[in-house]
Image (cartoon, rainbow, N blue to C red):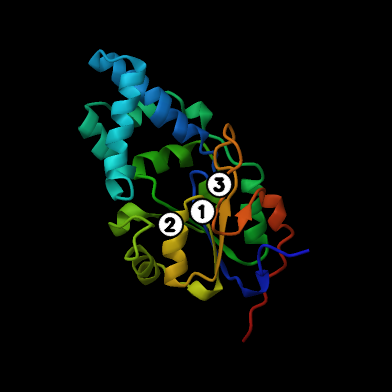
Amino acid sequence: MQTLVDWGRIDTVLLDMDGTLLDLYFDNHFWLQHLPGVFGRERGLAPEAAHAELVARFGREQGTLNWYCVDFWSQELGLDIPLLKKDIAHLIAPRPGAFEFLAAIRDSGREAWLVTNAHHHSLSLKLAHTPLTDLCDRILCSHDFREPKESAAFWPALRASEPFDPARALFVDDSESVLRAAHDYGIGQLLTIGQPDSRKPTRDGLHFPVLHHFNDLLPIPPRHVTA
């Protein structure tokens, strides 16, 4: 049986948050259902028209920091996005086995780093409703580096701030464009997520090795440190 990960060649595990450690359903529901409903009521638009207008606006910013920036969208739409997110915070949930996987990384003598494109407002909300702060050795936000993870400039900036050996790192993310940037930088092992949103079907046609459940990466053998 072929294994997804060569643990003997990993010191650092880099993990995306939304769609990787946490169920993407919260974010999809907020941006594609909850927010269009509020936006439509504020503008006197039918639900379908509000949804179509927002999706078009989102598309123009995709792949940039603005796409992830809560402050940008609050100003762009004239709505308090952080407050609206709190309205559905009860939907924030882990993907199956995510927290247990983080604990296993630490028990193995390796470090787990949360590396997210989420804006600080969104990140703070997720951290307040999950144990991620206690389970991750580093929590790193791309907004602090002024580049999204899909940018080639992000990865050297991350390494300059938080030194690690890319060749001895595992990176798990649900975004293929982010994974391509990490691959091009030289991250040693890469995995994508088969089902980021628990309410949607498992994805197919993915270009990176697919992780379906964190249990597929367990057990994690102890890290051997050479002198």
Of the numbered discs 3 and 2, the one sitting upstream in the chain is 3
Query: In x, y percent, where is residue 86?
Result: 41, 27
* Three-letter code for the amino acid on which mark 1 is drawn: Asp
The local crowd at label 3, few if under 14, some if 14 to 19, many if 20 or more residues have their Cα within 10 Å, is many
Camera sees residue 53: yes
**Observer-nearest residue: 201 or 117?**
201
Query: In x, y percent, where is residue 45?
Result: 28, 15
Disc 2 target residue: 178
Q: Height in image: 3 above or below 78? A: below
**Observer-nearest residue: 173 or 158?**
173
The image quadrant where one finds the N terminus is bottom right
Residue at 31% of width from left, 22% of height from top?
Answer: 50
Of the numbered discs 3 and 1, the one sitting upstream in the chain is 3
* Three-letter code for the amino acid on which mark 3 is drawn: Leu
Q: Residue furthest right?
A: 1
Name the disc covering residue 182, or none: none
Residue at 46% of width from left, 25% of height from top?
Answer: 88
Name the disc covering residue 173, or none: 1
Quarter holding residue 69: top left
> Tag 2's secondary structure?
helix
Disc 3 target residue: 21
Q: Nearer the viewer, mark 3 or mark 2?
A: 2
Query: In x, y percent, where is residue 175?
Result: 47, 51
Of the numbered discs 1 and 2, the one sitting upstream in the chain is 1
**Observer-nearest residue: 11 or 227?**
11
Residue at 64% of width from left, 79% of height from top?
Answer: 225
Q: Nearer the viewer, mark 3 or mark 1?
A: 1
